[in-house]
């Protein structure tokens, strides 16, 4: 059963993890819970998808404080993400 990331994003997630990004940071970036990222990392989901290293996401994005990223997403999105993390 495919998780909420989708095939295109799964390739980007794999690349970001290979590049050393933390799973929690990747989850915040995509607005999903960390379990979705963990499933991609472990191969439980999207095992046939190859990493997409042409994603164009700069490493500098996580020099921004995480709370600022969450504020950019908006209060309602933060609530949804928080509920997903609590599961």
Image (cartoon, rainbow, N blue to C red):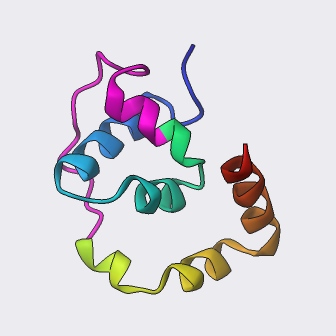
Q: Is residue 65 magenta?
A: no
Q: Name the residue at 27% across, 52% down.
A: 16
Residue 46 higher or lower than 30, as above or below: above
Residue 36 higher or lower than 85, as above or below: above
Nearest to the observer: residue 31 or residue 53: 31
On the rendered image, what quadrant is the C terminus found in?
top right
Q: Is residue 46 magenta?
A: yes
For the stretch drawn in magenta, the main secondary structure is: loop
Quarter of the image where one finds residue 59: bottom left
- Whether residue 84 sits left or right of residue 9 in the image: it is right
On the rendered image, what quadrant is the N terminus found in?
top right
Quarter of the image where one finds residue 46: top left
Q: Residue 8 in the image: state x and y as whole percent.
A: 40, 35
Q: Which residues are magenta?
A: 37-58
Q: Name the residue at 22% across, 36% down.
A: 51
Q: Residue 80 in the image: state x and y as whole percent.
A: 77, 56
Quarter of the image where one finds residue 71: bottom right
Residue at the far front: name it. 86
Q: Residue 20 in the image: state x and y as whole percent.
A: 20, 57
Residue 41 higher or lower than 23, as above or below: above
Q: Residue 56 in the image: state x and y as whole percent.
A: 25, 61
Q: Name the residue at 60% across, 48% down.
A: 33
């Amino acid at each position: 059963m495919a998780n909420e990331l989708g095939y295109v994003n799964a390739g980007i997630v794999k690349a970001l993890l290979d590049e050393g990004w933390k799973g929690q940071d990747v989850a915040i970036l995509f607005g999903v819970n960390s379990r979705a990222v963990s499933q991609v990392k472990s191969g439980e989901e999207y095992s046939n998808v190859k990493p997409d290293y042409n994603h164009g996401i700069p490493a500098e994005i996580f020099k921004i404080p995480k709370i600022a990223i969450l504020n950019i997403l908006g209060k309602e999105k933060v609530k949804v993400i928080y509920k997903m993390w609590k599961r």
